[in-house]
Image (tube, rainbow, N blue to C red):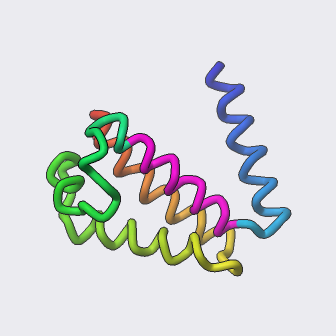
Amino acid sequence: QRRSLTESAAAVGNLHFRTSSGGEAVRNYLEYMKTQLQKMFGRSVHLTDTATIAARCGMTADDVEQRVRRATGLATNSSTSTSAAADAIRGLSEILNRLHGGR
């Protein structure tokens, strides 16, 4: 099953690369992150609550804010490169991973 998930992620990444839709990929990941935050903390915690998120994941508020701000900017940019999108998604996924207990 892990192989299937990895192959699926690679296929989605290739699709975004071929269609130059990096911004859309970041936008979708931000929506996923919002959903995960709601599942973990209820509707009281939002992406803009960087200090709260930082305290719960063991990062600095500035680091969380920088990652969220960068991703938000890329999500609204129609010319976001796939490498910039991948970097932003990696940054956001690290936050989520830490919130789920990974270090």
Q: Position of residue 63 (x, y in %)?
A: 27, 67
Nearer to the camera, 87 or 24 = 24
Q: Position of residue 77 (x, y in %)?
A: 62, 79
Q: Can residue 61 be spotted in the picture?
A: yes
Depicted 2 relative to depicted 103: above or below = above
Depicted 35 relative to depicted 25: above or below = above
Residue at 78%, 69% in the rendered image: 20
Q: Can residue 102 be spotted in the picture?
A: no
Depicted 62 relative to depicted 56: above or below = below
Q: Is residue 55 left or right of residue 25?
A: left
Q: Is residue 29 left or right of residue 64?
A: right
Q: Quadrant of residue 49?
A: bottom left
Residue at 36%, 35% in the rendered image: 39
Q: Would you say residue 65 sits in the magenta stretch?
A: no
Residue at 66%, 30% in the rendered image: 5
Residue at 26%, 50% in the rendered image: 45
Q: Would you say residue 29 sits in the magenta stretch?
A: yes
Q: Which residues are magenta?
A: 22-36
Q: Quadrant of residue 91?
A: bottom left
Please identify the quadrant where the C terminus is shown: top left
Q: Principal SS element in the magenta part?
A: helix
Please identify the quadrant where the N terminus is shown: top right
Q: Is residue 72 left or right of residue 6?
A: left
Nearer to the camera, 33 or 95 = 33
Count of numbered tags: 0
Depicted 103 relative to depicted 95: above or below = above
